[in-house]
Amino acid sequence: MSDIHELIRLLGELDDDLVGCMRCGMCQAACPVFAKTGREADVARGKLALLDGLAHEMIKNPEGVKERLELCLLCGSCQASCPSGVHILDIFLKARAILTGYMGLSPVKKLIFHQLISRPKLFDSLLGLGSKLQGVFAKPVSDVLGTSCARFHSPLGDRHFPHLAAKPLHKLQKELDEPKGSSGLKVAFFPGCMADKVYPQTALAALKVLRHYGVGVFLPSGQACCGIPSLSSGDESSFETMTAINLELFEKGSFDYLVTVCATCAATLKDVWPVMLRDPELKVKAKALSGKVLDISELLVDKLGVAPIEAAHNGRKVTYHDPCHLRNSLKVTAQPRVLLKANPDVEYVEMAEAASCCGCGGSFSLAHYDLSCEIGQRKAKNIVESGASEVATSCPACIMQISDMLSQGRQEIPVRHVIEVYAENLS
């Protein structure tokens, strides 16, 4: 936070945003954290009550306020179910920024956000080195799920995590600036950190599909993180730095839509950038760009006319998990299912509670792994009970979390991005 005036401004905005909450409690039924803890303080209504007196509370007990605010997945389930239309995610992000402005970032987060993630070249180089050394610190658990666990005592605990890609997307695919193809469309492509560094096969599948449909692609090199990890920790400074890098890159291209393969990135670019940026010039650019942001499934179904086909007889059974940010923030639910049903080798089956959170929540799973697992294990149970031999989703973070839960349960059910399933039968 630059100065006390900025802190006062944000507190004033927060007071204005809180007016709409009627304390009706509809958020209780939707909150995955409350479903496990049963504590009023953990549901949106309880947090909003706390924020009514934030200035006083953070002076009296800043650590306590921080703990309560961070016990939240930022999944948006409460916002999606709010009858008053309160922008709860905006409120929580502003509150975290206020608290971080008052307390400051921890040295570890300051190092990660200011010196690493906000410097794309350095971030790429260090993770490239990490991919070469990961065999020393991690041992494979499941080839089917692509998971490993730590060889030694690790801050990651008992989790089963994905390998870093041997070659990230930015090494496999150089920057692109193609003309519009037979579709008459050109898109900018924002793969996001996970599809670049962990799941490049997802991004490559998206590029394959775009070329199949004659869509020109603008893919600038040097893209930064979308910034949501920093902002979730209240760090507006590095969030603004990364957003500025990306806006400058995409300003150089001409395109009809900006497409992502990450639900969280899509929601951040479309909904968070225009609201949370402070710099007036960046804010204007973000608002102009937000109207062009689409999930890859939206582009294919809504703009290019991909439609379901007759279900395969004796095809492999595939189910689908709704990422929270895609469903709750962007209201995209039908399009990914259409892509699955458009693969002639797939028999689509709907799992129970497909829309429930998988428990990842980004940094939430690092800080509250036990609770994250409790939520995630229910998702894994529903996947197994669906009878599917494969599970698809539209968010790399969900792939990571669900793979962890299935791997720990010794369930060899591969987890893939929807676009990979759709692309496999395209020539």
Image (tube, rainbow, N blue to C red):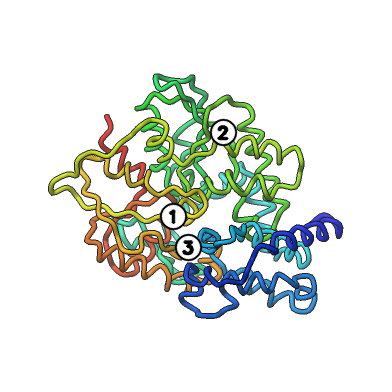
- As helix, strand or loop, the secondary structure at mark 2 comes to loop
Left or right? Give the position of 337 relative to 371: left
Labelled disc at residue 221: 2
In the rendered view, would you say 69 is above or below 414? below
- Distance in Å between CA atoms under marks 1 and 3: 10 Å
Labelled disc at residue 323: 1
Label 2 Cα crowd, 10 Å radius (few <14 / some 14-19 / many 20+)? some
- Residue 185, given in percent of the width and then of the height, sits at 46, 24
Q: Nearer the viewer, mark 3 or mark 2?
A: 3
First in sequence: mark 3 or mark 2? 2
- Residue 310, given in percent of the width and then of the height, sits at 19, 40
- Residue 51, given in percent of the width and then of the height, sits at 70, 70
Label 3 Cα crowd, 10 Å radius (few <14 / some 14-19 / many 20+)? many
Labelled disc at residue 360: 3
Viewer-nearest residue: 223 or 274: 274
Viewer-nearest residue: 6 or 223: 6
Q: Which residue lies at the image location 50% right of the left edge and 69% below the top edge?
A: 31
Q: Which residue lies at the image location 50% right of the left edge and 53% below the top edge?
A: 325
- As helix, strand or loop, the secondary structure at mark 3 comes to loop
Q: Nearer the viewer, mark 2 or mark 1?
A: 1
Amino acid type at circle 1 is: Pro
Quadrant placement of the C terminus: top left
- Distance in Å between CA atoms under marks 3 and 2: 28 Å
- Distance in Å between CA atoms under marks 2 and 1: 27 Å
User: Image quarter for residue 274?
Assistant: top right
First in sequence: mark 1 or mark 3? 1
In the rendered view, would you say 126 is above or below 4? above
Labelled disc at residue 92: none
- Residue 176, given in percent of the width and then of the height, sits at 50, 27
